[in-house]
Each structure stands twice: as structure tokens, then as C-alpha cells.
Amino acid sequence: MDTQIMNIVDQPQTLEMSNIPAETVGDVHVERPRMTARNVNVFYGDKCAIDDVTLDIAEKQVISFIGPSGCGKSTFLRCLNRMNDTIDICRIEGTIALDGQDIYAPQVDVVPLRARVGMVFQKPNPFPKSIYDNVAYGPRIHGLASSRTELNDIVENSLVRAGLWDEVKDRLTQPGTGLSGGQQQRLCIARTIAVSPEVILMDEPCSALDPIATARIEELIHELSAEFTIVIVTHSMQQAARVSQRTAYFHLGKLVEVGETEQIFTKPQHEMTHNYITGRFG
Amino acid sequence: MTEPRMTETGASMISPQEAAARVEAGLAARRGRERRFRAYGRIAIGIALAFLVTLFVSIFSKGIPGFFQHYVTLEVTLDSARLDPTGDLSVQSLYDGDARGVIRAALYDATGASGRSGRKAAGKIISAGAEQRLRNAVLENPAILDTTQRMTFAVDDDVDSFLRGFIKRETPEKDRRINDKMIGYIDALQEQGLISFQFSDYLIFGSASRNAEMAGIYGALIGSLLTLAVCLVLSFPIGVATAVYLEEFAPKNRITEIIEININNLAAVPSVVFGILGLAIFIGIFGMPRSIPLIGGVVLALMTLPTIIISSRAAIRAVPPSIRDAALGVGASRVQTMLHHVVPLAMPGMLTGTIIGMAQALGETAPLLMIGMVAFIVDVPGSVTDPGTVLPVQIFMWADFAERMFILKTSAAIMVLLAFLILMNASAIIIRKKLERRW
């Protein structure tokens, strides 16, 4: 009997190891790509975190990255605006291009790149400054506003688009850290869109929030997708299904399957994807 | 007692009742250990407190009387012919004049001293600093010339010791520093109510002096402030810049590692070694003058740097990485991230470290002895290149003198030094509380 139990427990494990496809299942290419990744490998020291990933990210669309913890989805996301540069032991091979231009080319400066590819983090991380200064920080350092009124307009516009204006318009000088978790995360989104990026990367933006705040952010992601290309990493498959048009499933550093969200969640082509979305492992 | 339950493998299990009984049995010993541990802690704190109290009682009991000294008030006839022979009120003219004679005349009047030996004895009652005080009073307000003024002068330190009871009347005349005639005159002055015990202006506004009653800490205090200013100006920017560079920009390689180890080692180097370094380099090689606050400040800055670097690095490391991510994520460069976010957030910690380093530097004696700041300097230093001394060195020098009054003034100076240290540490706490921000 014991042996039998062992077998059942072990089965998905063996499935995982042997069944990762050599080639990504589904169509990694899209018609109008904003960002393209070709044969990307990422190493932390000797450890391979991302293994030969090729993927297009379509313009003005939401793509979600799903997969079990440690599958490399966040690592891949952070490669898209070179946030991994701050980690000394991190090494990247292959090419990642934004609008056809290799972002890892030696002449590329990360400062304008990160202005074009903004990022929202897992934990809301407003600066310990006023709400106004949080949003105005990006435009200020990039010199986007030529006058005080223009800066005010940018701040107001960003807060309106982040759906936070009505809640904070009377207390712009109060610290951003005094807001609730959901408001803080929307403030971080406002801060990101204030520099008018082309792509917004979101690393599990709702994992620290309650369901109501989560619903609010998801709604916001939906609205923002009309203007921005959005890449979202999430642990919640329902969230992926709700907010994204395309879904990519990562496993152990490999991109297993990518496709239209509806297709991934209704007719996954690969067995591992099927197992993951039905909750068999992960 | 129930039967021990058996598992399938045959190992016996303790019954819940038995387990509870065993726990109960061990409980008394466990509680005892906890009680003893707490008692050891209390004893340790008690011993430390007892030492602290002893220190404070001894310093305060000697130090507080040290803030006061005896003065004598005399009716001085300020004869312009004697005091200002040239008549132009110049400093030179006043020095040529007979201020000493004028004061003595008033003293003879008050005590009724007559004869050669009597006048000699009466003259010893008053401090040698009285003439200078008289000249200063005239310079300040020439209108008092040719009038009679009540003026207060410090008494000689031996007289002060006698008045405090350190020199006993009963001691045979040849064994005490005050002879019977002087005692008679002092009694006469006291009967007329001319002797007063008041706050010692010499202690605060006086400079180094061999005469205990005239000695003060003003010169040393200014020297300390100048030295600390040099130390702060050098060590704070260099320390913070080093910490920022090592923490955020330096490549993690062997050289960085060696530098880090050396900085940590420097923090433990005896301070006198820094003094020898200053002596060898600044005075030996560069030929700079001795005893100047500039070199003192540089030497103390070298000594303070490791403290500032270590505390600044800890403060920088304590800034949550999410703030860095946030700044980098909106496209701030590494320098902007550093200057706009990390350094402001780390500033309370950096300032605390700096103030504690400064407090350490304020109390430092040994390295300053090496570079000659122990010299006897009467003039108050006007700039960092004037020879001077500092408070702890002044205390060190006074502690060497035998006069009773120097012992009192040493304790008083220690109290002033302690007050400054407490002030600095308190400001460190206030700054930390004020600037502390939540994130």
C-alpha cells in the first residue's frame, strides 16, 4: 500500500521532468509585436533560470505569465526592462528587442529604456514622499514637464487614469505611504504611467491585496490595455483568465505553451499546461 | 498509571498522563533556572549602576564646588595719574601704570595691614589676575577713572583653599601655605563681609593659567570646537561618500573585500596610533606647526572615519530594496536612486553614526598629545591654525597639578565635557526620531 501511495505522489514529478517540450507549444509569434525575445537564456551564476525562451509581446494587449513558483516568469519579466542588471551574478544570452531594437545592445542606456518599459512591483512600494511627489518623480527626473502647470497636469492625468484621483485629490501633499494597500498599488501604477511608457510590466501586482482592491486593479489593467502594452505575472489563473488576451505558461525556466487566453484555459494543447490549470500540480 | 501503548513497530509510547507528570516534575527546575538567570541580569545591571553612581557622585561632589570660587570686594580709588601715566588710555600706558599698587592700596585700607611683612602678607591674599581685571575695566569704561569703585577680585588659590577649609587653622604655621598674618587679614575681610563665594567667571571665560584661581576652560573649549569642526567637515562627506560607493557602486571583488576588512580593522586601532600617524605625516613630512586644531581635526577625522563608514553602510543596507526597485523602475539612474531616495532615507542612521563618532572625537586625548596639543597655551585660538588645546587634554593637564583648586576645576571641566557629550548624544537621538520615516 505504501508503495502505491509513493507512486501516486511521484507521478506528476516524473511527468514534469520528462514532458517539458523541446519547442514551445502554440504560436510564439504575433502580427504586431512590441517586444520580441529570441532564444533568451538567463543564468544566476551557474544556475540556468530561463532556458531558450522565444516570445513576442503584442502591442496594446495584455499578456499574462503563469506557472509554479520558481519557474522563471518573474525573472523573464525583469529581463524586459533590464531590472536584472542590478543583480551582479545575473547573465543574459539571446536578444530582447523593443520596437525592433535590441535592448541589451552595448550603446543602449537603461534610463530611457526603463522610462519606455515601466514596472509595477509585487509589494506596493510608494516612495516615502507625498502623493504628488510620488507621481511627479518620474516626469521630473526625465524632464517631461516644462512648467509647473504642465507637471500638475501630468500628475492629475496619471492619477485619473490610475483611478485614484477622486480619492486623493484633496490630500496630494500627504505621504503616499499613508494610503491603503490597494490605493498604494494604484499610486504605483500612476507613478509608472506618468512617464508615458509603451510597455508596463506588472509583477504579481495583486498578490498583497484583498479581493476588492484586486478587482479594482484588474479593472484598471483592462482600461489601460487600450493605451499600453501590458505584461503581467500572476499566480492566480482566474486573474490571468480575466485580464489577459494571451497567456504564456512557464515551467522550470522553459516556456511550455503560449496562446490565446481562452484557448489556453479551455483547450490547452500540452499536458503540463492542462495539469497546471486544472490544479493537478504547481 | 495506564499501560504503555504499543505501536505497530513495537516501540512503547508514553501515555499522555505520564507525559504530563514528567513535564510537571521538571517544571520547578525550569522555573528556578529562569529565576536565577533573571537574577544574574539584575545583579550585573546593579553593579554597573553602582559604578556609574559612584562616578557621578565623585565628579559632581567635587565638580559643583569647582564652578564657584571666593572673591574679595574692595573700594578701589582709580587714580588716573597712577593708572594711566601717559594719559592716552592706550594699553601700553595702562601696563606702564601701577594697577598693582592701586589694588594693594585698597587692600591695605580694608585689612589695616602695615609694615613690610604685613603688607607682603596682605598682598598674597589677592590673585595675580586682579591687575588685568582692573585694566580691562578701565579700558571698557574710562569714565570710572578718578572715582572710587567697588570692585571684585578673585582671591589667591591658597586663600581659597583656606576659606574652603582645606587648609586648617590648627596646622602649625610653618606647615601651611598661609601664615598667621594672612589668616588675621582674611578674618578681618570676612568680618566686614567683603569676601564672597560666587560663580567662577574665570572657569568659563578664563584660559590656561598656572594660577589655579585664574585657570579656565574657554581656550580649550574653543580649541575643541575648532578641532571638531575640522573633523566633521572632513569625516562626514568622506565617510558618507565611501559608504555609498562601497555599498552601491563598488564591484564585489578582492580589492573591495580588502578595503572593507581594513576599514573594519581601522575602527579597532588604538587612537594613539592615529596620533603617531599625524605626527609622522603632517608634522614630520609636511612640516606643519605643532599644537594646531587643524592637524588635531585631521587626526580625529581619520579616527572617526571607520565609525561613520560602518554606521552609514548599515543605514544604507537598512533601506528596503523595494525603494531602489521603485526608483529604478521609473527610470532613475543609479546615482539618482542613490541621491534622491537611498541617502535621504539612510540619513538619520548616518547622522547618528556621525554624532556618536564626533562625541568619541570630543573625548579623545591620546592622539592629540602626540601632535603637541598638550602645550601650555594661554591665548584662545582664533583659527584652526593657531596653537590651542582641547577640553580632555586640558583636564588631563589640570589633573597633574597639585593645587587643591585645580582638583576642583578638573572635576568642573569634566562636568562641562560630560554635558557636551550628553548634549551630542541627545541630539543624535532627537535627529533620529525626527527624521525617521515609515515605509
Image: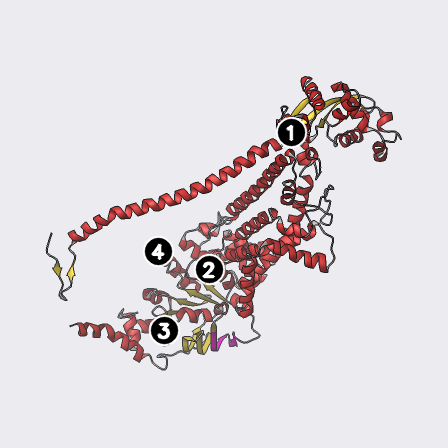
| Residue B126 drawn above or below residue A53 | above
Residue to which mark 3 is pinned: A250
Q: Is residue A4 left or right of residue B337?
A: left
Name the subunit of mark 1: B
Q: Earlier in the sequence, mark 3 or mark 4?
A: 4
> Hey, which quadrant is residue B190 in on the image?
top right
Give the position of the C terminus of chain A as an image quadrant: bottom left
Disc 4 marks a residue whose amino acid type is: Asp
Q: Which residues are magenta?
A: A91-104
In the displayed structure, A120 sits above or below A131; it is below
Query: Are discs 4 and 1 both within one chain?
Result: no
Q: Secondary structure at mark 2?
A: helix
Quick check: B436 left or right of A2? Answer: right
Magenta highlight: main SS = strand
Residue receiving disc 1 = B161
Q: Rounded to the nearest whole Å, what is the CA distance between mark 4 and mark 1? A: 79 Å
Few, some or many C-alpha atoms within 10 Å of disc 1 (few <14, some 14-19, many ≥20)?
A: many
According to the picture, the residue beneath numbered tag 4 turns out to be: A210
Q: Distance between the Cα atoms at labels 2 and 4?
A: 20 Å
The residue that mark 2 highlights is B322
Residue A132, numbered label? none
Is any atom of residue A144 visible in this view? no
Question: What is the quadrant of residue A234 in the picture?
Answer: bottom left
Please name the amino acid that badge 1 sits on.
Ser
Q: CA distance from mark 2 to mark 1?
A: 67 Å
Q: Amino acid at mark 3?
A: Phe
Q: Residues within 10 Å of mark 3 (few under 14, many from 20)?
A: many
Q: Secondary structure at mark 3?
A: strand
Residue B243 figure quarter = bottom right
In this rendering, do the residues under marks 2 and 1 share a single chain?
yes
